[in-house]
Amino acid sequence: MNTELIAKKLAEWIKDNVRAAGCKGAVLGMSGGIDSSVVAALCIKVLSKNTLGLIMPCHSNEKDKVHAESVAKQFSIPTKTIVLDNIYDEYLKILPDFKPDKTLTQLARANLKARLRMITLYYAANQLKYLVIGSGNRSELTVGYFTKHGDSGVDILPLGNLVKKEVRELARFLKIPPEIIEKAPSAGLWEGQTDEAEMGITYEALDNYILTGKAPEELKKRIEGLRASSAHKCTTPPIPEF
C-alpha cells in the first residue's frame, strides 16, 4: 500500500464529498482511538477551518479523553467536549428492562451510548451545515462490528476500504501518537471491553481472511456467521416488491 498516496487521496475524497453535499465542513466523534484519530488528521488537512471534533465521554475511561485531546492538540483540531453521562443515566431511569438478561442488557446499554453520540453529532452537523464523518473500517464493516444507527449513523466512511492493519500503517504515516496506535482497540462500551474479545477474532486473523480469503475452517465459519447475522446492518431497510 502506497500510504502517502492513500492519505492524500482520502483527504481529497473527504473534501470532495463535503462539497458535493453542499456542506461547509466536517464534524466527527473523537474517541481517542486509532480510527477516529486518523479520520480527524485527514479532515484537518483539507478542511482546516471547517473541521470540528466532538469528544463525547459517556462513563468512559479518562485515558480515552486524554488521547483524543492529545490528537486534537497535535493537529490543531478544534474540539468541543460534551459529557453524556447524565442524559445516559436519565434514559436508563425511564427505560424498562424488557428482557432482564444480563448479557443482552449490557449490549443494549452499550448501544445506547453509541446512539446518543450519533444524535449529538447530527445536532452539530445540522447547525453548522457539516457532514458527519465516520471512522468505521473494512474489518469492522465485514463482520458488522458497529452499532446500527449509532457509530454507523454517518454520512461518509473514509476508512471503509481499509482493513485494520492498513489503518495502522496510515496512522504511523500521519504520526498519530504511538500510545494510540499500540493500545488494544476498544469501543469503550464497558470497563475492560476490547474489540477482539467481543468479536472473538483477532484483527490480524480477520484482516488476513478479508485480503486473502484464507483461514482455518473454524475461523472462516465464525467470520461468515458474523457477516450473515449482521447483513441487515449494512443495507437499507427492505421494502416489499409488490
Image (tube, rainbow, N blue to C red):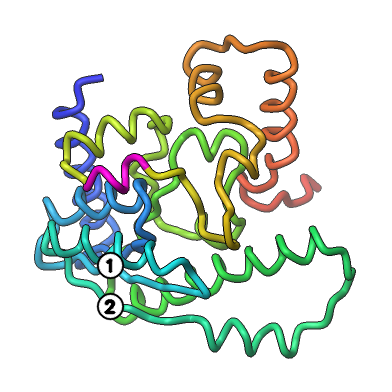
Q: Main SS of the magenta segment?
A: helix
Which percent across, then down, holds residue 12?
17, 43
Q: Residue at x 75, y 39 (%)?
A: 229
Give amino acid for label 1.
Answer: Gly
Q: CA distance from mark 1 to mark 2?
A: 7 Å
The N terminus sits in image quarter: top left
Residue tagged 2: 80
Give left or right: position of 99 versus 154.
right
Q: Residue at x 39, y 44 (%)?
A: 183
The numbered disc on residue 94 is none
Residue 114 painted magenta: no
Give amino acid for label 2.
Answer: Lys
Q: Secondary structure at mark 1?
A: strand
Do the numbered discs 1 and 2 sit on residues whose CB atoms are within 8 Å?
yes
Which percent across, then down, holds residue 5?
15, 28
Q: Secondary structure at mark 2?
A: strand
Which percent across, then down, holds residue 187?
51, 54
Q: Residue at x 32, y 78 (%)?
A: 81
Q: Which residues are magenta?
A: 177-182
Q: Residue 11: which quarter of the image?
A: top left
Residue tagged 1: 53
